[in-house]
Amino acid sequence: MAELDTSSGGGKHKGGKVRSKKASTRVDLTAMVDLAFLLITFFMYTTTLNKPKAMNVAMPDNSVKTQSLPIAASRSMTILLGSHNKVEWYMGEPGKSAPTVDHYGKDGLRKALIDNAKQVESTHAAPDNTMEVLIKPSDKSTYENLVAALDEMKITNVQIYAIVKITQMEIDDLKKNNIY
């Protein structure tokens, strides 16, 4: 039982007057404690938990050496994440096709992903008609840029993509386009 004792003590005070002793006041807090636990229980049962906003990314296990599968260069798109919220992408192998500097968003990277996926699908026979994307963040890109690129993969429904290390040749290419 919860109680709050507010007794002042009564008895003698300054001035020598004798006052009558008052009965102490007691407040029974049992009902308030019961109400608090009832509210806590109510909110625990009725609150919905936040759904995770994380995206599942399967990272390779470095301890196991696996054999790499050959991928046609014409089906691969490489995205280089540069500075100033800019991105550079090219199809195929580095140095063999002209890179395009673009930005994130609906009219930039997303449009390029959709267009290139359609082109790969139309030029290759099934089941090898899906585009594979390599995302290469540079030292000058931000974590936000990587998340934006992964969001574009999800939005454009790219099934196969990987985050890999950027090569020195690609860094030089970013420097040449002033986004490193």
Image: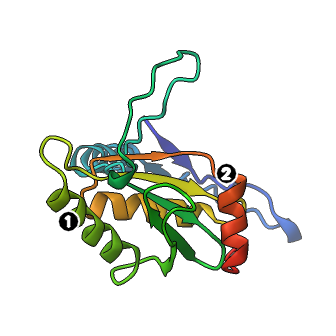
Q: Examine the rendered structure and indicate whether residue 102 appears above or below residue 173.
A: below
Instruction: Residue 138: name its quadrant.
Output: bottom right
Could you tell me how far apart the alpha carbons at marks 2 and 1 are, in whole angstroms? 27 Å
Q: Is residue 1 left or right of residue 131?
A: right
Which numbered disc flags the more N-terminal residue, 2 or 1? 1
> Three-letter amino acid code at disc 2?
Thr
Q: What secondary structure is marked by label 1?
A: helix
Q: Residue at x 27, y 48 (%)?
A: 159
Question: Where, quadrant-wise, is the N terminus in this rendering?
Answer: top left
> Three-letter amino acid code at disc 1?
Lys
Residue 162 spot, x, y in % from top left: 45, 45
Its colouring scheme is: rainbow
Residue 137 spot, x, y in % from top left: 60, 57
Q: Is residue 69 left or right of residue 94?
A: left
Q: Residues within 10 Å of mark 1 (few under 14, many from 20)?
A: some
Q: Is residue 35 left or right of residue 91?
A: left
Q: Residue at x 32, y 52 (%)?
A: 75
Rendered image: mark on residue 167: 2
Residue 140 spot, x, y in % from top left: 71, 66
Q: Which residue is mark 1?
A: 118
Q: What secondary structure is marked by label 2?
A: loop
Question: Where, quadrant-wise, is the C terminus in this rendering?
Answer: bottom right
Q: Residue furthest bottom?
A: 107
Q: Residue furthest top?
A: 64
Q: Residues within 10 Å of mark 2 (few under 14, many from 20)?
A: few
Residue 168 spot, x, y in % from top left: 72, 54
Front-lying residue, 166 or 91: 91
